[in-house]
Image (cartoon, rainbow, N blue to C red):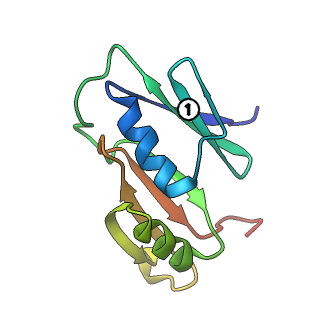
């Protein structure tokens, strides 16, 4: 198996498209109300969903992550582009070489920048 992408449903997907476009540039694709960005080998897609209304009531329930070898630099770049900061870069359990930074989109969905972690890091 290979995890490939995440789809974020919204009652106002254009608001999310505008937000993620400021952060990641023009969508890699846009078709039928869905827009997506390829980040590394994975995809984030946003689009309409008839079972979604309002903002995410539990933004910490699901967090999607972007691996970055320069969390502080990418954090600054995303913040400058208008990203909503939830938590500035920090080292989990005090680890200085492994950083995480958390952001929120306009629907209160959380995503994070993370230093490479695991055996291949």
Toward the bottom, the furthest residue is: 96
Q: Local crowd at mark 1 within 10 Å, few (<14), some, or many (≥20)?
A: many
Nearest the camera: 21 or 98?
A: 21
Q: Specify whether 103 is left or right of 3.
A: left
| In front of the other: 86 or 17 | 17
In the rendering, at what x and y percent does residue 82 appear?
38, 62
**Residue 67 x %, y %:** 62, 61
Q: Quadrant of residue 85?
A: bottom left
Q: Which quarter of the figure has residue 48?
A: top left
Q: Residue at x 25, y 24 (%)?
A: 53
The quarter of the rendered structure image containing the C terminus is bottom right
Q: Residue at x 68, y 43 (%)?
A: 42
**Which residue is pictured at 37% across the width and 74% down the height?**
88
Q: How many marks?
A: 1
Residue placed under numbered mark 1 in the picture: 35
Image position, residue 70 (x, y; %): 61, 76
- In the displayed structure, 3 sits above or below 103; it is above
Q: Secondary structure at mark 1?
A: strand
Image position of 19 with respect to 10: above or below:
below
Residue 105 point in image, percent of width and height:
36, 48
Q: Is residue 82 left or right of residue 41?
A: left
Name the residue located 53 percent from the left edge and 25 percent from the top edge: 34
Q: Quadrant of the N terminus?
A: top right
**Is 54 placed left or right of 70 in the picture?**
left
């Amino acid at each position: 198996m290979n995890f490939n992408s995440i789809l974020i449903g919204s009652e106002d997907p254009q608001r999310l498209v505008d937000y993620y476009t400021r952060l990641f540039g023009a969508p890699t694709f846009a078709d039928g109300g869905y827009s997506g960005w390829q980040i590394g080998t994975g995809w984030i897609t946003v689009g309409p969903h008839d079972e979604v209304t309002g903002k995410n009531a539990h933004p910490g329930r699901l967090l999607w992550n972007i691996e970055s070898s320069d969390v502080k630099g990418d954090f600054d770049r995303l913040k400058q582009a208008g990203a909503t900061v939830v938590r500035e870069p920090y080292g989990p359990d005090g680890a200085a070489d492994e950083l995480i930074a958390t952001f929120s989109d306009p629907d209160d969905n959380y995503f994070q920048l993370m230093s490479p972690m695991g055996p291949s890091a």
